[in-house]
Image (cartoon, rainbow, N blue to C red):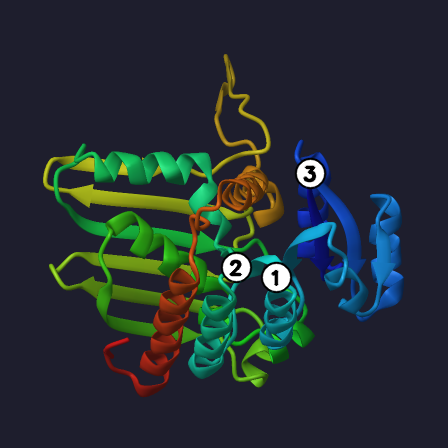
Amino acid sequence: MTGFCLLGAGRIGRVHAANIIAHPTASLRYVVDADFAAAEALARRHSAVPLDDPATALADDAVRAVVIGTPTDTHLDMVAAAAAAGKAILCEKPIDLDIDRVDRCLDIVARHGIPFAVGFNRRFDPTLAALRRAVRAGEIGEPEMMIITSRDPAPPPARYFAASGGYFCDSTIHDLDLARWVLGEEPIEVFAMASCLIDPAIGATGDVDTAMTVLRTASGRLCHINNSRRAVYGFDQRVEVFGAKGMLQTENQREIGLTRATATGTDSRPPLKHFYLERYAESFARELDDFVEAIGNGRAPAVTPEDGRRALTLALACERSRREGRAVAP
């Protein structure tokens, strides 16, 4: 069994805790959070030990792996402590909001030679993985355009934005990683525009809630990403890849697959899955599967520290483009 220490008992921590418990070769030994009451509540649910400091857990030889789901500005310290203790690390994105700090993190990981995975869970979604396989297999010829729609059902509370790192680093970064992963090429130019159209309180923090981004790769492939913090009909997640020989599309997932056809008409629009926790539930579980397998087999996890660095570089370029009103090189 791979013993785990979970750092962070918030929303994403609860997802990871449930997946660790459900995994046949993993066990959750510790839950750590600066808010001890939160750690205690989650630990009690899963028969783990609650802590408000990770030192005891990191000193335990039965702990082989650490999942970091704490606020982004704590990631570097957490990675340094876990790496020094020789623990494999799964760190939520972004690794940090500053490239220099990310580079320090990657240097620490390399020096200690530990497995390190970055939490771009969407790569493990079965539908998106099938899309990528089809692109790589040449089913639509050479890809020419990619369109990613990613819209949340509603914005989080305004207090969230002060520490989120901005829309591009907080949310669009998932789509930027997806574009790299599917197209198999690095973007060399980024142009982003954004507005605050939904909640003035978001704009008061200096952030935005509506964005459009265009990426261009070295071969000329184009990717358009559109993001919104509000989609009143549910969590809107669609991807299209258009190529020389055809097109591939992923559709929204709905709460139920039932459609109706009666004398009064047809109904094929059940509600969308409400948020990422529901839409990407399977991807989080498969992400953990890959991490545990990587530890057991001595291989690198599928999503590497360099993937985390490149996605952040693109996200920061988006923000720079948005502020300067021009296309920029990442």
Coordinates of residue 17 in the picture (x, y in percent): 72, 47
Coordinates of residue 174 in the picture (x, y in percent): 44, 58
> Which quadrant of the figure has residue 103?
bottom left
Name which residue type carries label 2. Answer: Ile
Q: Is residue 129 left or right of residue 74?
A: left
Reading the chain from its start, which is encountered first: label 2 or label 1? 1
| Disc 1 secondary structure class | loop
Name which residue type carries label 3. Answer: Met
Q: Which residue is mark 1?
A: 86
Disc assigned to residue 114: 2
Q: Are marks 2 and 1 in contact (CB under 8 Å)?
A: yes
Is 292 above or below relative to 8? above
Asked whether residue 104 is in view, the answer is: yes
- CA neighbours of label 2 inside 10 A, class few (<14), some (14 to 19), many (20+): many
> What residue lies at 31% left-to-right and 87% top-to-bottom?
324
> What residue lies at 60% left-to-right and 45% top-to-bottom?
274
Coordinates of residue 280 in the picture (x, y in percent): 54, 43
Reading the chain from its start, which is encountered first: label 2 or label 3? 3
Q: Which residue is mark 3?
A: 1
Instruction: Tell me the distance, in whole angstroms, between the alpha carbons under discs 2 and 3.
Output: 18 Å
Disc assigned to residue 303: none
Q: Is residue 76 left or right of residue 171?
A: right
Instruction: Tell me the distance, in whole angstroms, between the alpha carbons under discs 2 and 1.
Output: 7 Å
Name which residue type carries label 1. Answer: Gly
Q: Is residue 59 left or right of residue 177?
A: right
| Disc 3 secondary structure class | loop
- CA neighbours of label 1 inside 10 A, class few (<14), some (14 to 19), many (20+): many
- Judge by depth and name the residue closer to the eye, 287 or 255: 287
| Disc 2 secondary structure class | loop
Reading the chain from its start, which is encountered first: label 1 or label 3? 3
